[in-house]
Amino acid sequence: MKRKTNFSPEQQLTHLDSRLVLSLQRLSDMLKAMQWEQARLLGVTPLQLQILLFTGYHSPAVNKAAYIAAELQVSRPTISDAVGSLVTKGLLEMHNDKRDRRSFSLALTETGIEMLEKAGAYMGQIEQLLNNKSDQEKNLLYQSVYSIIAGLITPDKGGVQRMCYNCAHYNGNKKRQHECLFLQKRLLSSELQLDCMYHSSLS
């Protein structure tokens, strides 16, 4: 007899946690499929699409191959290959770091900026769905998703690092009391940031 797991339809009938795990998996699969299709339409790979979106909306300080590799949780050589292809396609260019000649930052070319406007279009359907939900429902959803993401991040893993919980400016109990010392204001749980431009590392 097969052991019941979160992926078992029998267990999903009676366990909410199992249905939640499945729903998150399905959502992830759907987002990946939408991203693949958008990348195909633009003539890039899904990874190249992610690099374009990241580079287009972040500062030179974090637009570096090593940083993006950690952000997207892929190897440095994989990022380097994808960046090289984007440079060849005329979508990215590399600028030498004046403070460290061994390092360089990435920037979109004019062609890359034009593509950026189309790059995130695959999220339009989700944006429309969210627009039709009440603020209360969106606040609760965001708090739940934020807590799951925060719970998955550990010091030995890459990925999202510019969250309130691992920021030097954060003061609170990670439950209902939150304060940003940089902005000098209390934050609602729905105002906690995943990708904050004012983030300061704890180390």
Image: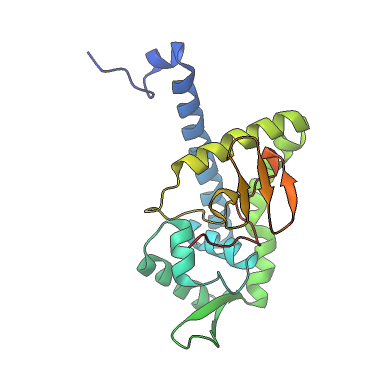
Residue 62 occupies quadrant: bottom right
Residue occupying the point 53% across, 75% down: 89
From the top left corner, tell me how far across and down residue 138 is, in percent: 70, 33
Lateral position of residue 45 relative to residue 38, left or right = left
State the count of labels.
0
Q: Is residue 187 above or below residue 88?
A: above
Q: Quadrant of the N terminus?
A: top left
Residue occupying the point 46% across, 28% down: 21
The reply to whether residue 32 is visible in this rendering is yes
The reply to whether residue 133 is visible in this rendering is no
Q: Is residue 51 above or below residue 34?
A: below
Q: Is residue 195 above or below residue 129?
A: below
Colour scheme of this structure image?
rainbow
From the top left corner, tell me how far across and down residue 165 is, in percent: 56, 48
Residue occupying the point 69% across, 45% down: 124
Which one is nearer the viewer's eye here, 138 or 189?
189
From the top left corner, tell me how far across and down residue 59 is, in percent: 63, 70
Which one is nearer the viewer's eye here, 198 or 80?
198
Residue occupying the point 48% across, 59% down: 71
Find the residue positioned furthest to the left: 1
Which one is nearer the viewer's eye here, 79 or 175?
175
Find the residue positioned furthest to the top: 14
Q: Is residue 42 above or below residue 180?
A: below
From the top left corner, tell me how far across and down residue 203 is, in percent: 48, 63
